[in-house]
Image (spheres, rainbow, N blue to C red):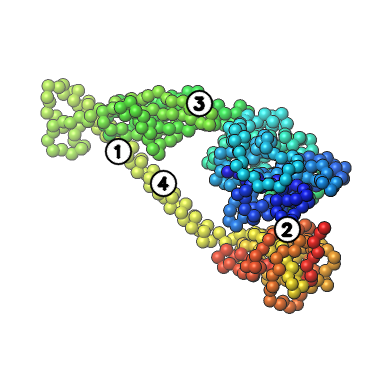
Amino acid sequence: MPQQLIYTSAPQGIVAGRSGHCTVARSAKMREPLMLQLEKFCYYQHLSLTGGQERPIYSCRIVDIRGTRFHVLSRIQDAGLDFTGRTNFIAHHLVFTPEEIRQFPTPPVILREWPGWVKSWTKDPQMLEKEDWADLTAFAGRSSVPAQTWQRVTGDAVNGYGLLEARAGASFRVDDQADETVLELIAESLELLEVRDTRRDFHTTAWNYTFTTSMQEQDNPADFRWRCIHSDNPAANRFATPDCRALSAVQATKLTGEETNFARTGRQPPKFVKLAADNYDIQEGAGVKLEVATDGIPTPTIRWFEIERNQPKELVGKSGTIQILNPEGRSKRYQVQAFNSAGSVDSNVVEISIRAPVKLATRNQTTASRVTATPVLDNEDYQEKKERQLRRLEAEKEQKDFQNRQLRNKILVSILTIGLIAGALVYVFVLRGRKPPEITWQPTIQTSEDGLIRIIVANFGKKPFAYQWYKNNQMFLSTSNSFLSLEKNTLSNSASFFVIITNSIGSVTSTVAQWPGIPAPIITLPPTTNPPAETKTNHSARLPLEDSDFNSSTNGNTGTNQSKLNLKGKTAPKKP
């Protein structure tokens, strides 16, 4: 079940000896690494101090901790003054695992509708046990289609698909929209995934679309696929991408008829389903074509059944609206069921009569001469026998033609399968390694007892790599290896660092590490020589690291590098 954490300013935190801004409540089963990660998301800009407007901030993130993935929903808002008379805020986080998200509503629905969000805290610190999540699952069936909010804001409900078409990392200005409206627009777009991406369950896919309703200066843009921006935030211009536009100006460009109807009318259960055959009286061994006609939005899925002794038996592996079957026996009865997320309906029953083959007594003869051979008559008219024989031969010919077509189709499928496998092998052995650099560990500052200050970055991709370090937004040093070092006397009182990593495919820019910052664990490395000149960045990314994390290594299979920047000096003093 979900876990939660509440963070605000209090005289005493849940961890002994902590006060001020700290965790005051969390789920009893929550482990410490997850708690520490959530505390990194606990910050709030009081925009009223700079003439802006205070507003709650809603966000959806995905975090990975030691190989375990978590989906984090956060609500952060102003909380007046704390017990010391200073400005305060409260952050409330809900955490879900991938295995349990299917049973809950989509993230924007929870952020907007769940009544359990804590907006102030006056209690003592506490571990939360026997949590009741019934009110979370109560509105799991809530529907966000038809897309009425997109209809009201943009004039057409189909524009909800435009948000799905936006590239990852796009930014949107939302000054003209209330926070609840922004959440409703996102909820409607995510529900449109049911017909836009039919290969996946939209309830699960929706949790992979991360977003925030208002970017803050401390936010890492890479955390969010959709980034909403308010112009009264001093960081708005920094986070605005070149294609930044108003959320109300988003429009869809690629639509099918089903997608249009789904956005404008919502789900419609199938009202009828009709099953028909191309021939209700066939010769034994011949095939019969069955076809289904139905309606409904989204397009219904078809289940096929064979009726045996008045009991339906599902034909496993059969789907779609057309089936070609080879029934056996003297008669067969078939029925289908059409269903979608709004309802289901059963079809009429179709009965196929099967005639036994005609057996004629003839002398030994070739197939070509069977038509002209004189049959041995048994109280039947000769002409009638001849016509029945001709019909049987025609049926046999049609059956053979059908079997030949099936064989050709199987051969074509085999050829296509071999081609796909060959293409996959080419990709695996030739193309997989051709990747641009990707940072797996953002620059992190470490201070050691011997006076060195270390900055570490890790990346992978196609080798070789070039590292261009920056200090205070100015070029500092370019290197082809993973080690750089400086002594503290080469630094000013404060500095920021970041690095651009390049290979033959592309480049990537890291986040910013700030000096001085909160010192990480002390690590001792072998002495280095020729300390390089100084470099540049923007804001800090701090992660707790272990000793093994600072060993420089290169993975020959994946092309993963770890780069380290060492700065010699004493540990920076903690901020009050």
Disc 2 to disc 1: CB gap under 8 Å = no
The numbered disc on residue 541 is 2
Q: Earlier in the sequence, mark 3 or mark 2?
A: 3
- The residue carrying pointer 3 sits among few (fewer than 14), some (14 to 19) or many (20 or more) residues within 10 Å by Cα, namely many
x and y percentages locating residue 96 in the rendered image: 61, 45
Residues marked 3 and 4 touching at CB (< 8 Å): no
Q: Which mark is residue 400?
A: 1
| Nearer to us: label 1 or label 3 | 3
User: Mark 4 to mark 2: distance in Å?
Assistant: 52 Å
Q: Residue tagged by mark 3?
A: 270
Where residue 358 sits, quadrant-wise, is top left
Query: What residue is drawn where x is 74% and y is 72%?
Result: 449
Number of residue marks? 4
**Helix, strand or loop under label 4:** helix
Who comes first in sequence, dot 1 or dot 3? 3
The residue identified by callout 4 is: 413
- Per the model, the C-alpha gap separating discs 1 and 3 is 38 Å
Badge 3 amino acid: Pro
Mark 1 crowd level (few <14, some 14–19, many ≥20, 10 Å Cα): some
Q: Nearer the viewer, residue 31 or 358?
A: 31
